[in-house]
Amino acid sequence: MEGSLLDGVNKPETQEVEDMTVLEKKHSVVIEAPNKIGKEKKFKVVVKVGEHMEHPNEPGHFFEWIELYADDTFLSRIHLTPEKTHHKLITEIKLNEPTKLVGRARCNIHGVWEGEKQIKIE
Amino acid sequence: MEGSLLDGVNKPETQEVEDMTVLEKKHSVVIEAPNKIGKEKKFKVVVKVGEHMEHPNEPGHFFEWIELYADDTFLSRIHLTPEKTHHKLITEIKLNEPTKLVGRARCNIHGVWEGEKQIKIE
Amino acid sequence: MEGSLLDGVNKPETQEVEDMTVLEKKHSVVIEAPNKIGKEKKFKVVVKVGEHMEHPNEPGHFFEWIELYADDTFLSRIHLTPEKTHHKLITEIKLNEPTKLVGRARCNIHGVWEGEKQIKIE
Amino acid sequence: MEGSLLDGVNKPETQEVEDMTVLEKKHSVVIEAPNKIGKEKKFKVVVKVGEHMEHPNEPGHFFEWIELYADDTFLSRIHLTPEKTHHKLITEIKLNEPTKLVGRARCNIHGVWEGEKQIKIE
C-alpha cells in the first residue's frame, strides 16, 4: 500500500500554487485566518479545499469531512454530504499563545490532505 | 428515565422567546437562513444555540455537536470542543423545492434539542 | 430530486429477504440483538449492512457511517473508511423499557437506509 | 493553558499498569488485537478505555469518542453517549505490512488520550 494516497496524510510538495500539480491544487487544504490575533480574543477560521482548482462534489467523488486542530489539539470536525453541502469548516476560536492551526480533509478517492497556518499573538 | 431530557428530542413549548423558560432559551436551536431562495441557488445557513440566552461552553457542560437536515435528509454535522470552539454550524446549501430545514444539537447535560425553519422557493 | 435515493431515508418494501430487490438486499440495515432483555442489563447490539447480499467497500462506493438510536434517542455513530474497515457498528447498551432500536447507514451512492428491531423487557 | 490535559494528546508515563497514576489508569487507551496477523487477513480490533480502572460514564464526565489509526492513516471513529453506550470501538481491519495501531479517546474533562499497539505480519 506504500505510495497510495489513501494511506497517511498528503501535502502539496510546494506552497506556490502555480507550481502545484492538478491533484495538489484540487486537494490543498487552505486555512483562512488573521496572521496575528489578540490573546483570548475570538476570531474566525475557515478551513477549505478546492480553492486553487475546483474539486468535484458528487456522490462518487467528494470530501467526507474537514477537521481543525490547534497544533495537535482537536478543535472541530464537520461532516459533509456530496452535492448538498459545500467544502468548508467555518468556526470561531480563541488562542492564548502562538499556534499552528492544522486543517485536514478526506477525499474518498484521494485520501486525507493537510494544510497549516501559523498564528501569532499581538 | 421517562421524562428525562436525555431521552428523545426536546423542543421549546412555544416559539415566543419571551414565553420560554430559561432552559428553553438556552437550548433553542435557531436556524438563520433566507425565508425564500432561488431554486438550486446556493445560500448560507447558520444553525446555532444559546441565541436567546447564553449557554455554558465549558468542559462539564457544553454542546457536543450540531446537525442540519433538509426535511429528513442528512446534510451536515459539526463536532465541537468546549471552551475552544463556538456553538454554530455554518454551511452553504442548495434546494430545489420547498423544504423544512431541521437543526439538532446535543447538550451533554440536557440532551438533544431541535429547531426548524421553512424555506420557500421563489 | 424527487424520488432520489439520496433524499430522505430508504427502507426495503418488504422484510422478506427473498422478496427484496438486489438494491434492498445490499443496503438493508440489520440489527442483531436479543428479542428480550433484562431491565438495565447490559447487552450487545450489532448494526450491520450487506448481510443479505455483499455491498461494495471501495473508495468510489461504500458506507460512510452507521448509527444507532433507541426510538428517537441518539446512542452512537461509527465513521468508516472504505477498504480499510468493515460495515458494522458494535456496542453495548442498557434499556429500562420496551424500545425500538433504529439503525441508519449512509451509502455514498444510494443514500441513507434504515432498519429497526423491537426489544422487549423481561 | 500550558500543561492543561485539555491541550494536546496525553499518554501515561509508563506502560506498567501498577506504576500508573489513578488518572492514567482511568484514561489509558488499550488496543486489543493479535500481535501478529496474516497479510490482508481480516482481524478484530478493540480500542477501549477504563480497562485498568473504571472511568465514569455519566453526563458530566464521559468519553465523547474513540478513534483508530493505522500509523497516521485514519480508519474509524465512534461517537458515544454517556450512560447509554459503553467505552469501546470495535471493528475489523486488514493490514499488508507491519503497522502501529494508534487509538485516541476524548474525555470531556481530561482531554484526549492515546495508546498504541505494534502489529507484525506473519
Image: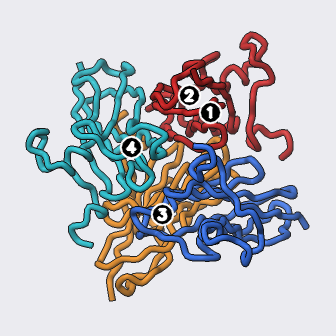
Chain colours: A red, B cyan, C orange, D blue
Q: Nearer the viewer, residue D63 or D39?
A: D63
Which residue is situated farthest in the top direction here?
A: A18
Callout 2 amino acid: Val
Q: Earlier in the sequence, mark 1 or mark 2?
A: 2
Check disc 2 and report its element: helix, strand or loop: strand
Callout 3 amino acid: Phe
Mark 4 belongs to chain: B
In this rendering, the answer to whether B39 lies above or below C53 is above
Q: Are marks 1 and 3 in contact (CB under 8 Å)?
A: no
Circle 2 Cα neighbour tier, 10 Å, few/some/many (<14 / 14–19 / ≥20): many
Q: Which mark is residue A47?
A: 2
In this rendering, the answer to whether A94 lies above or below C62 is above
Q: Are marks 1 and 2 in contact (CB under 8 Å)?
A: yes
Q: Nearer the viewer, residue D92 or D114?
A: D114
Mark 1 belongs to chain: A
In what quadrant of the picture does the N terminus of chain C appear? top left
Structural distance between the alpha carbons of marks 3 and 2: 28 Å
Q: Nearer the viewer, mark 3 or mark 4?
A: 3
Check disc 4 and report its element: helix, strand or loop: strand
Q: Which mark is residue A64?
A: none
Q: Residue at x 75, y 18 (%)?
A: A15
Please name the residue that numbered disc 3 is placed on.
D62
Mark 2 belongs to chain: A
Circle 1 Cα neighbour tier, 10 Å, few/some/many (<14 / 14–19 / ≥20): many
Q: Residue at x 83, y 70 (%)?
A: D35
In what quadrant of the picture does the C terminus of chain C appear? bottom left
Give the side of residue D6 with respect to residue B119, left or right: right
